[in-house]
Each structure stands twice: as C-alpha cells, then as structure tokens.
C-alpha cells in the first residue's frame, strides 16, 4: 500500500508541475505598440464613407449681440437712444437627422436693451435691460447635398421661433434735475427728467433666420461660426420718460426694446450619441 501511495503522489506532483509550466509558457498575443483600438467608425471607414442616420449633441455658444430700441420723442434733442453691442452666451441641445436636417433648442442668457442718452455739457449714457432670458427652437438645413449621410464640414441655413419670459418687474427708476435762465433779472427755470424702466408683464416672442458654417473638429466635436438675424414680436422692456419745467410736465416719451437685431458668434458642440446607417454595407 505504501508503494502504491508513493506512486500516486509522484504522479500528482508531476501533473501539477506540467500544468504550471504549460500556463507559465503560454504565449500571450498583445496589440502592437502604437496601434489604436478599433471603433465602429474606424471599421466602417475601411468599407467606404461613414454614413450616420442620426446624432445628438450638446454645446455652448458665445456671441456678440446688437439690438435696436426705438424712441418716440427726443425732447427737442435733449435725449436720444442707440443700438448697443454686448457679449452674451447660450446653451444648446440638438438632434441631426440623416446629416441633412437639425432640430435645435437653445436657452440664451442675453439681454434686450433700452439705451438712454442725455445730451448736454456733460452727456450721460445708461443701459437699461430686461431679465436677460430667452428660449429658441430652430430648424436647420445643410446646403451640401452630395453625400447625404456623411458627416463633414458644411454650410447650414435655418429659421426659428422663440419666446422671452418677462417678469413684469420695474428694473430702474432715475430722476435728473437742472436749471435754465429765463432771461436777465427773470430768475431761472427748474428742469426735471424722470425715467422708469419696466419689463412686460406678459411673454413676448422672437423670430429668427440664421446661417452658419459647421467644422468637424473631431469624431465627437464640432465648431460652428454663425450669424443670426432676430425680430422681436412684442415689446420686452419699456422706459417711460417725462420732462418737467417748474414742476409741470411738458413732454413725455417712451423707449421700447423688442429684441430686434443681429447675433454673431462661435459655438462648440459635443456629440454624445451617434447612430450609424449600415444599409449600404454589403458583406460578401
């Protein structure tokens, strides 16, 4: 029995050693240094153009905004207005279908302005703003028609409709005083100008047309350079002005801003979903 036990132990030891040696010397096939792992897009490129059925992206826009306000009465040249140019930003999310059509939603942190100019020996300028919020829904069409489902740099044109959620709050109130000689030995007149700025108590609208050039920076990154023309539908911010001489109101006026103007800017977008079109691939 001892001899049988000894033989069994030797056999087990030899088998174990053989198994360990086999595992130890097993060849491991690794990827060559410097090569990149295949992605769905890189594999499809070996069969031709990469066709995309749809994609989703999120991004941020930075732009310069110019909007125009209107003045009903200049008090014989005492006051005026002008179109300011200010910086603004927005956040967007969009869906692209067949690399031909885009539906995009935007939230913009961008003010609609009234500018009050008071002329005189010491001219004064005041920027009067609404609540700075607006939302836009726009559709866009690519102008490159050659290969409809291939993602590449191209021109796009679009149109949109949006709204401005006004709060109805008073934004600013100012009073200005001055004096004017009536004539020799007749004393002086006391002049006063009041300005009250408030936003609309109701939401107002925006209409838009746009043109942009979208550059494909990387597999999931695009950059866009755009110009947008907007028209206001309803007054978002109103400045009421009154002119007094010796405590008596002589004239009144209004400055109104509805958001009509131009936007010029840059957009950076991150593509977080790509849907590929495999219909044109033929596997032999």
Image: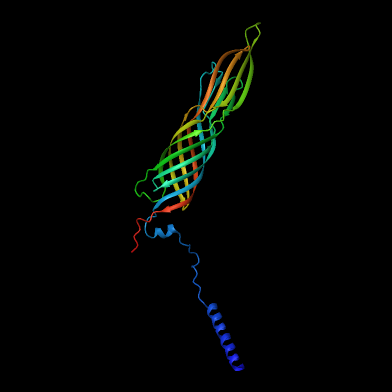
Residue at 43% from the left image edge and 53% from the top image edge: 275
Q: Residue 225, percent across and down?
A: 46, 42
Q: Is residue 178 left or right of residue 140?
A: right
Vertical position of residue 45 compared to residue 209: above or below: below
Counting from the top left corner in percent of width and height, residue 145 is at 35, 46
Q: Report the front residue among 218 and 9.
A: 9
Task: Give x and y (percent) for residue 72.
Answer: 51, 20
Colour mode of the rendering: rainbow
Q: Position of residue 269 (x, y in %)?
A: 49, 47
Q: Is residue 85 above or below residue 196?
A: below
Q: In the drawing, does residue 183 fall left or right of residue 34?
A: right
Say above or below: 27 vs 48: below
Q: Quadrant of the C terminus?
A: bottom left
**Residue found at the very far front of the displayed protein:** 1
Residue visible at 50% across and 46% down in the picture: 58
Residue 43, quarter of the rendered image: bottom left
Determine which quarter of the picture holds residue 156: top left
Residue at the image position 48 percent from the left and 41 percent from the top: 105
Quadrant location of the N terminus?
bottom right
Numbered-mark total: 0
251 versus 15 height, above or below: above
């Amino acid at each position: 029995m001892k001899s049988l036990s000894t033989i069994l132990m030797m056999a087990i030891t030899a088998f174990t050693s053989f198994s360990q040696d086999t595992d130890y010397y097993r060849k491991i096939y690794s990827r060559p240094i410097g090569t990149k792992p295949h992605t769905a897009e890189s594999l499809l490129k070996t069969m031709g153009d990469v066709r995309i059925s749809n994609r989703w992206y999120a991004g941020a826009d930075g732009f310069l905004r110019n909007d125009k306000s209107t003045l009903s009465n200049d008090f014989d040249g005492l006051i005026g207005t002008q179109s300011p140019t200010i910086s603004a930003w927005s956040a967007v999310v969009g869906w692209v279908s067949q690399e031909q059509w885009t539906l995009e939603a935007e939230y913009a942190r961008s003010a609609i302005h009234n500018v009050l100019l008071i002329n005189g020996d010491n001219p004064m300028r005041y920027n009067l703003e609404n609540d700075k919020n607006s939302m836009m829904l726009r559709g866009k069409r690519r102008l490159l028609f050659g290969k409809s489902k291939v993602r590449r740099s191209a021109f796009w044109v679009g149109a949109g409709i949006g709204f401005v959620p006004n709060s109805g709050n008073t934004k600013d109130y100012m009073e200005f005083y001055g004096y004017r000689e009536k004539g020799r030995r007749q004393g002086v007149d006391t002049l006063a100008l009041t300005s009250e700025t408030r936003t609309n108590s109701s939401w107002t609208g925006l209409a838009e047309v746009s043109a942009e050039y979208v550059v494909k920076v990387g597999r999931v990154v695009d950059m866009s350079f755009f110009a947008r023309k907007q028209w206001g539908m309803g007054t978002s911010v109103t400045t009421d002005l009154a002119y007094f001489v010796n405590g008596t109101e002589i004239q009144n006026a209004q400055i109104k801003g509805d958001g009509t103007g131009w936007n010029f800017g840059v957009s950076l977008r991150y593509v977080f979903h790509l849907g590929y079109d495999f219909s044109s691939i033929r596997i032999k």
